[in-house]
Amino acid sequence: MIHDVKIKRLNFIPDDRGRLLEILRNDDEIFEQFGQVYITTCYPGVIKAWHMHKIQNDNMVVISGMAKIVLCDLRDGSPTYKIVDEFVTGDFNPLLIHIPAGIYHGFMCVSTSEAIILNIPTHPYNHKSPDEFRLPFNTETIPYSWERKNR
């Protein structure tokens, strides 16, 4: 796994009224600070990639549907330089993925319905000077193919 990336396995707590899913608590080892909370969605088969932040860390959870979240370490001097991590997560595999600054990441909806992704970044979005750096989804800089792998 990429250096500094952290995963928190999430578990539903069911009862006769429904279920509860704790995502991120301020006493979790993975918690750093609060910036904001937002959701983004992705339609089936759509790829939203690649982007990276220089300041903020992301904490992403697929709260509905299924998505493939992919990370690539392009940080100079990192012990995991050019390593790619892939997580298929959502309804059937709930995970919190902590994505440190400097890691390119993106996602693709792999369910038949829209994927809804919750993000809790460590800094609020700066509309005047966004901390966001992009590469096209099919860049040759990142050794990854978004095609489905039929095994």
Image (tube, rainbow, N blue to C red):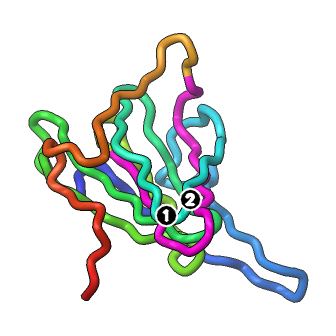
Q: Secondary structure at mark 2?
A: loop
Q: Residue at x 59, y 27 (%)?
A: 124
| Residue marked by disc 2 | 43
Q: Are marks 1 and 2 in contact (CB under 8 Å)?
A: yes
- Residue 127 lies, with reference to residue 87, above or below; the image says above
Q: Nearer the viewer, residue 43 or 1?
A: 43
Give coordinates of residue 43: x percent, y percent: 56, 59
Q: Residues within 10 Å of mark 2 (few under 14, many from 20)?
A: some
The residues tagged by marks 1 and 2 sit, at their Cα atoms, a distance apart of 6 Å
Task: Please count the marks in the image.
Answer: 2
Asked if residue 53 shows in the view, the reply is: yes
Give the quarter of the image for residue 144: bottom left
Q: In this picture, which residue range is highlighted in magenta?
A: 105-125
| Residue marked by disc 1 | 109
Give coordinates of residue 58: x percent, y percent: 47, 43
- Residue 142 lies, with reference to residue 102, above or below; the image says below
